[in-house]
Structure formats: structure tokens, C-alpha cells
Image (cartoon, helix red, strand yellow):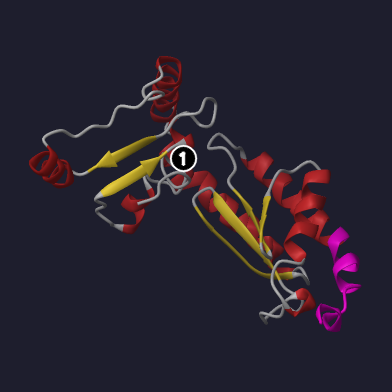
Amino acid sequence: CDEVICGFGRLGQWFGHHHYGVKPDMISMAKGLSSGYLPISATGVADHIVAELREKGGDFVHGYTYSGHPTAAAVALANLDIIEREGLVERTREDTGPYLARALASLNDHPLVGETRSLGLIGAVEIVREPGTNKRFLDKEGEAGPVVRDLCIRNGLMVRGIRDTIVCCPPLIITHAEIDRLVSIIRRSLDEAEPILRALKPEAAA
């Protein structure tokens, strides 16, 4: 399971595989360990895999030059302590995650929005030429996302544009007021993007 994004509270559980009821053999982890304050990553490996490697090779070698850096490890431990002490996983599941879902859903009336979707504190706004359809600008994916993304950034909100979808992973400490501001900036950016995108002609793709 890739828990680089979904791990450490993002979906309202400690790990994404907990939410989905999956029992992984291996787990990759990274920025959630330190909330991105310092670079650190880790891989969790199930006992039966370690046993197999030891049986075949004698050792389970997993120490590398930059492994276990003490400063990064200390920051990660402090970060995990804060997440646990302040109940940020539970808060994401019971409060801010549902609030983000409701706030994003308010964008569904926008003429550029095909749908909004979220789980915990990860959200997406899909951009289409005609609501209720999957029609894209210039009849192909990837034209609208960068336009809206750049406007969001210009308006003070850092988001990613993945093809024609704007995605965000706000911090676990986000407040209701900050979620409202996040959604307000997305709406403003969609409003500013609409005349730009409407000026693109589908036949121009050829």
C-alpha cells in the first residue's frame, strides 16, 4: 500500500488501508511522518516477507547511507506525538473532513464543475465544459486544470492540477474558516477561468 499521501490521518484513519479494510504486505510511508517539515520515509514489511528473505539470504539488509537520520527521526516522533495528542486523526474523520466535503459540494452549482469529491482531508474538483457530461475543453483532458490551478495559486491557494481536476490536501490542523476561504478561492478562480476556457474552441484541438 502506498501511504505516502493517505497515511498518518489524511483519510480520517491512521492509514488509508485501515479505511478500506486492506491488510497490506508492504507499506511505503514518507511526508506524513513529519508533516513535511523534514524529509523522511519508511517502508513497513510484513513478518512473512522478512522470514522468506532471511530463509533465502540469511540477512534482511535494510540499512543505507541516509537511513535513520536522527534529526529527521526526532522531528517525525514529535510530529506523531502532536497528531496523537491533539486528536487530529479523529478530528479529520469526525469534523473537518465532513466539513470539507460539504464546503466543496457547494461548488457543484458552478457551470465548470462536473463533480466534487473528497475523503477526509483530500479533495478534488473536476472541471468540464458542460455539467452533467464528461465533455472536456478542446475535447481532450488536461487543458482546463492548469488554467484553474494557476489562477488558484495567483489568488493565494496552493493546489495541484491533475489533468482537468483540481486537488488539495489541506493540513490536518485546518479550521472551518480556512476551509471556507479555500473553497471561496476555488470559486473565484473558476469564475475567472470560465471566460478563458469558453474562448477555447473544441475544433482547435485538431
Q: Amino acid at mark 1?
A: Arg
Q: Position of residue 44 (x, y in %)?
A: 28, 40
Q: Position of residue 194 (x, y in %)?
A: 85, 66
Exactly how many numbered labels are in the figure? 1
The residue positioned farthest toward the left in the image shown: 55
The residue positioned farthest toward the front in the image shown: 57
Answer yes or no: is residue 138 visible.
yes
**Residue at the disc numbered 1:** 91
Residue at 49% in and 35% down: 31
Q: Position of residue 83 (x, y in %)?
A: 43, 30
Dominant secondary-structure state across the stretch colored magenta: helix
Residue 13, quarter of the rendered image:
top left
**Compared with residue 28, is residue 36 higher up or lower down, i.e. above or below?**
above
Magenta region: which residues?
192-206
Residue 43, quarter of the rendered image:
top left
Residue at 76% in and 58% down: 146
- Crowding at mark 1 (Cα within 10 Å: few <14, some 14-19, many 20+): some
Residue at 86% in and 79% down: 204
| Residue closer to the observer: 173 or 30 | 30
Residue at 81% in and 78% down: 205
